[in-house]
Amino acid sequence: MGLFVINRIAELREKIKNFKREGKSVGLVPTMGCLHNGHASLIKASSERCDVTVVSVFVNPVQFGPNEDYDKYPRTLESDKELAEKNGAAIIFAPSVAEMYPGMNKFSDITMVAPPFHMVDMMCGKSRTGHFDGVCTVVSKLFNIVQPDYAFFGMKDIQQLYIIKKMVSDLNFPIEIVPCPLVREESGLALSSRNKYLSEEDREIAVSISKSLFAIQNAVKNGIIDTKKLFDAAITVMDRRVEPEYIEFVDRKTFEPVDTIKKPAIAAVAARVNSVRLIDNILIGE
Ligand code: PAF
C-alpha cells in the first residue's frame, strides 16, 4: 500500500473515513517517535491484527515537566518512516504542536484529562507531576482523531498502560487496548528512546537496572515474598552509580501497592544513570 505521511488532522480523518467505509479495521500505535525495536513490535502486532495501522509520531509538550527533556527529546522522522513502513504501517500521523494544540500558550489554556489521583500518586506520577494528565490528554485526542478499533501500548510504560486502560473504561472509548510485551536488548537493558542519551559506559551501568529486576524475580521464585527483602535483593545487584528513584511492587490486577507477593504482581523501577531517567519492570509471582 505504501506509507502515507500526514500532518493535518482533517486529512487524516478523511483518509480514515475512507478506510472505514471499505470496512477496514484500524489500529493505532501512539509514539513520540525515535522508533526502536520495541515500537517495531507494537507496529507489527497492530498490522497483524488490523487492516490499517496508523503510527502517531508526536513529542507531546504537555506531558513534559518544566525541567524535563522536551527540547532535546530525539526527533528522527526519516528513520521512523522506514521502521514504520517495514513493520506494516500504512500511515504516519506527525502533526505539529500548533495542529494538536491550536492557540495554546500555556498548558492551562487547554482542557486536560486527569487520571484518578490514586493511580498517579505513586511511581512515575510522584516525581513527574502532571505527566499522566498530559499523556491522557494527548491519547484522548489521538483516539478521537483516529477513532481506531485497537490501540497498542508497550508494557515498558506499565503505569501508563494501566492508566490508559482505566481511562478507556471510565470515558467509554470504544477501543480495545492491546498490551505488548517489553522488549530488551541482549544485555537485558529495556529498549527506550532515551537509551540514545547513554554513553557506552552508561549503558553498561544501566544494564544493572534490569539485573536488579531479574534478582527480584529469582528471589520470588525462591520463595521470598516480603517486598522489603525483594527491595534489598534488587539494591544489592544495582551498580552503585545508578541512582534509584523508586522500586515499587503492585498487584497485576488492581495496580495497587503490595507488601507481600501472594498473587501475580509487577516489580517496577525508575532510576537515573548519569542524569538519564530510565524505567523498567518485570512480572513476578506467576
Ligand atoms: O509512551 C509514549 O511514547 C507516550 O507517552 C504516548 C503514549 C505516545 C503519549 O504521548
Image: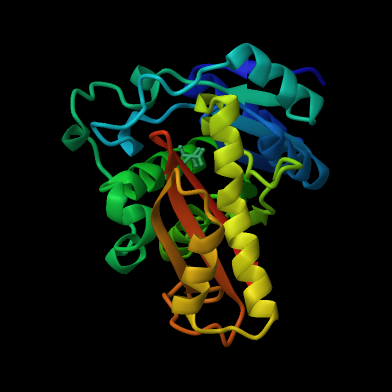
In the image, 219: left or right of 8? right
Indicate whether 256 appears above or below 160: below
Spot occupied by residue 26 in the image (x, y as percentages of width and height): 68, 41
In the image, 53: left or right of 137? right
Q: Residue at x 56, y 68 (%)?
A: 266
Q: Residue at x 62, y 23 (%)?
A: 92
The part of the image, by quadrant, that contains residue 253 is: bottom right
Spot occupied by residue 254 in the image (x, y as percentages of width and height): 48, 76
Spot occupied by residue 57 in the image (x, y as percentages of width and height): 54, 26
Q: Residue at x 63, y 55 (%)?
A: 211
Residue 241 in view in this figure: yes
Spot occupied by residue 18 in the image (x, y as percentages of width and height): 68, 29
Residue 286 in view in this figure: no
User: The C terminus is located in which quarter?
Assistant: bottom right
User: The N terminus is located in which quarter?
Assistant: top right
Q: In this rendered view, identify the residue nearer to me: 81 or 79.
A: 79
Query: How many labels, in total?
Result: 0
In the image, 158: left or right of 54? left
